[in-house]
Every structure is written in C-alpha cells, then in structure tokens.
Amino acid sequence: MQDNPFDLTGRTAVVTGASRGLGQEFGRALAAAGADLVITSRKRDDLAAFQAEIESLGRKVTALELDVRDHGSIQRMADAAANACGAIDILVNNAGCNVRKPALDVSWDDWNLVLDTNLRGTFFVAQAIGRGMVERGYGRVINIGSVTSVAGYAGLGPYCASRGGVKQLTMSLADDWGPHGVTVNCLAPGWFRTEQNKVLYENQEWLDYLVDRIPLRRPGQPGDLRGAVVFLASDASQYVTGQTLLVDGGISTGATRATVPAKD
C-alpha cells in the first residue's frame, strides 16, 4: 500500500448523474484527492459549468452524455470513456430518480421509471465499466444507495424497492468480481437536501420532525459524503467489499425513542 492510501493521483473515475447535487459532490471529492474525471448526464450541456470547475483544479475532465435507461447509451458512454481516458479505475454509480406517491397511486409507468433508472441502470452501467476492470484486475465500484436501502418509508415504494435492490446487487457483484481484484460497495446517504426533495425541507414542521429522529440532530450536508466516497474509491478500502456504508447521522439506528426525554 502507498504511503497515503487515500491518494487518487493517476486514477480515473466515472461519475454518473453529475449535472447537479450529490453527483457533483462526489466528483469534487475525487478530484480533490487527485483523480481525473469522466462526468455524465443525459444532456452534455448541463455539465459545462461543473467541467470548468474541476478543470480549474488541474484535473482532466471528459463530459459525456448518458441515459441509464438506454442500453445503447450506456455502452456508447463506456466506449467513449475508455477511448478518451484508457483505463477506468473508479465508478460512482450515482444517476437516479424518484417518484413520491402513496402506494395506491403509483402507476405502472412510475414504477418502471424508478426501477429502470435506479436498479437496472445501476447494473448495466456497472457491467459496462466493470468489464474493463475485471480484465485489468483492478477496480473500485461504488453504487449509490440510500438509507432506504435498509429502511422503508411511506410514499417511496418504488424508490425503496430500487435502493434495496442496489444493496443486494452490490453484494452479488462483490462476490462475482472480488476474485478479479474489483471491490464493489454501496454508499448510502441518509437525508440530504437535493433537487428531488427540496420541497420537504421548506416545511419547518417536517424538518423538525426529521431532525428529532437523527441522533446527530441535523440533516446531512453535502460535504459529509466526501470522506466516505474517497475511502471507498481508494486503496484505503482494499479489503472492503460487498458492504453498505450508511452516512446518515444515525437515523438508521431507529426512529422510535425508548425513553421519555428529561424535562428542563
């Protein structure tokens, strides 16, 4: 192991869903640790500002279009990334979506949108990038899950099913590719404000309700994920595979208090 096992200098990472939100935070963390990036979005133009930001750090950045619901698009992205950068060392499988509805209101199309994006897309992107990793005998695959990988929430039926599936898929791929020097882990954020859920955070009553159930007494901040993604992408985690790392402030420990709070 190198002197600094967290150093990613000389590595290249693919980060999907990098046009906004947590995908950009993952990219920033990997670039700060020394990695060059391949960033993807359904619309390449949406990546221009982020590409310029990372290039200002002195990193090489390749921006590519990717629709994870389209198998042809996945393969074109993987081929273009390999042609532009050669070996891909790290994959952050971040692209995802959500539909918030009571279970009785979820449509066939709602279900397919979420599962095709979050679960099927995760598998086939991992397959496309992982093929080269297996051939070379090295790779770090980081599938992005959620606290819903281990807990169910009303109104999130398709999303919970997809993220639970990502957790199980991660273990399967870890078993499959471990003999070839490829680790596969799931990074599972808790409650972080994103474009998908920002309307919730604008409701103070709901926010107080949430914070009361998080042992660290605050929602996640984007920077809270940086150390975790670098750890899983680096040689510091070389003997860690098939695991789900929850970065959730402790909410997954359980949301029901077993004692009465003391009065002032």
Image (cartoon, rainbow, N blue to C red):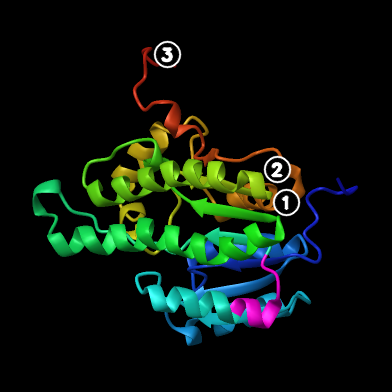
What x and y, as percent, mark residue 177?
59, 48
**Badge 3 element:** loop
Query: Mark 1 or mark 3, which is nearer the start of the sequence?
Result: 1
In the rendered view of the protein, which quadrant contains the C terminus? top left
Q: Which mark is residue 94?
A: none
Q: Is residue 199 left or right of residue 105?
A: right
Q: Which residue is mark 3?
A: 262
Question: Can you see residue 25?
Answer: no
- Residues drawn in magenta: 81-88
Residue at left offset 81%, top offset 48%:
5
| Magenta stretch holds residue 45 | no
2 and 3 marks in contact (CB < 8 Å):
no
Q: Nearer the viewer, residue 17 or 77?
A: 77
- Along the line of sight, which residue is nearer the eye, 171 or 214? 171
Mark 1–mark 2 CB contact (< 8 Å):
yes
Task: Tell me how far mark 3 sits from mark 1, CA to CA.
Answer: 44 Å
Identify the residue shown where x is 30% and y is 37%: 152
* Residue shown at 77% from the left, 59% from the top: 8
Q: Main secondary structure of the magenta part?
A: helix
Label at residue 237: 2
Spot the residue most to the right. Answer: 3
Dot 3: few (<14), some (14–19), or many (≥20) neighbours within 10 Å? few
Image quarter of the N terminus: top right
- Residues tagged 3 and 1 counted as in contact (Cβ below 8 A): no
The residue indicated by pointer 1 is 234
Quarter of the figure with residue 194: bottom left
Indicate the position of residue 75 as horizontal and vertical percent values: 48, 75
Question: SS of the residue at dot 1?
Answer: loop
